[in-house]
Image (cartoon, grey):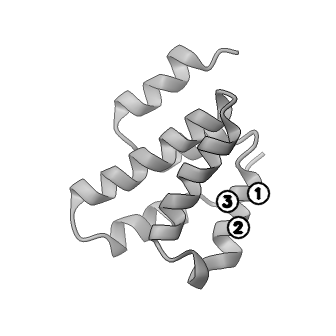
Amino acid sequence: MNPVDIGKLRIIIESELPSVERQLLHADAFATGCFLYKSGAKAAGRKLCYGVLDSLGFEKRRTYFSQILEALDGNEDLFASEIWPHAEINELFKSKCDV
């Protein structure tokens, strides 16, 4: 179930952040939030995801960003992979989330 196009978030990150390093930092932080959420640290994971969205202008994208947060449960793997973080971040899902 993926009612939210997370690719749009990736495009926002790529188009609005000036350097590849900052883009990857945001993608890694968002994917790590997804991992924490899936691992059972739901409050911490949601806060980290929200922090990324807030740094990208949550208020001017309230509807879309709220949809992302509402759809997080059950879409953690998909959201993390679609945001294109470092491979090491996606490996967390394979090695630690078989719960």
Vertical placement of 33 versus 54: above or below?
above
Report x, y in % for residue 25. Answer: 33, 51
Residue beneath the point at 64% across and 68% down: 65
Q: Separation of disc 3 and disc 1 at Cα?
A: 5 Å
**Amino acid type, residue under disc 3 in the picture:** Ile
Occupied quadrant, residue 55: bottom left
Report x, y in % for residue 59. Answer: 60, 81
Vertical placement of 17 versus 72: above or below?
below
Label 2 belongs to which residue? 66
SS class, disc 2: helix
Q: Residues within 10 Å of mark 1 (few under 14, many from 20)?
A: few
Report if the CB atoms under discs 3 and 1 are less than 8 Å apart: yes
Q: Separation of disc 3 and disc 2 at Cα?
A: 5 Å
What is the quadrant of the C terminus in the image? top right
SS class, disc 3: helix
Residue 90 visible in the current orientation: yes
Label 1 belongs to which residue? 70
Report if the CB atoms under discs 3 and 2 are less than 8 Å apart: yes
Residue 68, label in figure? 3
**Amino acid type, residue under disc 1 in the picture:** Glu
Vertical placement of 73 versus 36: above or below?
below
* Callout count: 3
Report x, y in % for residue 17. Answer: 31, 70
Residue beneath the point at 44% across and 67% down: 11
Residue beneath the point at 69% across and 57% down: 69
